[in-house]
Image (spheres, rainbow, N blue to C red):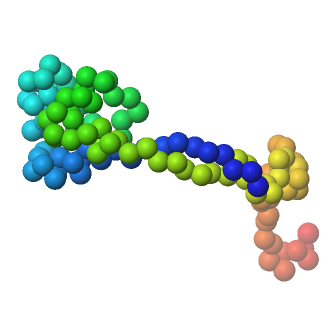
């Protein structure tokens, strides 16, 4: 099966903060503000606890300055290998014996034996 190369990354801001004895995201707010980066407490919290999809270069540089670290310590690119297609999965539901607009399970009615003879 052919494989597709996919690039991901790991965000280590929380770990680097802990190494520098910064335990709360609210402690970063005034430090960022002193460097001209005005973020709300909730924005900083998401930056610390989550993995950002985009981060402005000015914010990234301010974090490196505050934490006295390099960008490589905060941001670690990783290569993820993933399969390009699923293994031998049928392309259509008909290949599994399922026809469109027909239920897979059918409702049945159980009739006691003595009632069956009366009908």
Q: Nearer the viewer, residue 114 or 78?
A: 78
Residue 49 position by quadrant: top left
1 relative to 38 in the view: left or right: right
Q: In the rendered image, which quarter is residue 37 located in?
A: top left
- Examine the rendering and report whether any part of residue 98 can be seen: no
Rendering coords of residue 22 (x, y %): 11, 46
Taking the spot 85% from the left edge, 56% from the top edge, the residue there is 96
Q: How many marks?
A: 0
Residue 27 image position (x, y, % from top left): 9, 38
* Residue 78 locus on image (x, y percent): 47, 48
Instruction: Report the quarter where the C terminus lies.
Output: bottom right
Q: Is residue 94 left or right of residue 17?
A: right
- Residue at point 54% right, 50% down? 80
Q: Residue at x 76, y 55 (%)?
A: 1
Q: In the rendered view, would you say 29 is above or below 113? A: above
- Whether residue 63 is visible to the viewer of this picture, yes or no, is yes
Percent coordinates x, y for residue 54 in the rendering: 38, 29
């Amino acid at each position: 099966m052919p494989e597709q190369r996919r690039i991901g990354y790991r965000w280590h801001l929380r770990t680097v903060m802990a190494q520098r004895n910064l335990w709360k995201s609210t402690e970063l707010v005034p430090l960022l503000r002193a460097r001209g980066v005005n973020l709300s407490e909730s924005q900083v919290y998401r930056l610390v606890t989550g993995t950002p999809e985009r981060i402005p270069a000015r914010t990234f540089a301010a974090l490196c300055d505050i934490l006295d670290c390099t960008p490589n310590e905060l941001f670690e690119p990783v290569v993820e290998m993933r399969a390009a297609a699923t293994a031998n999965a049928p392309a259509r539901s008909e290949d599994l014996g399922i026809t469109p607009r027909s239920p897979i399970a059918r409702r049945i009615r159980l009739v006691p034996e003595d009632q069956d003879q009366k009908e």
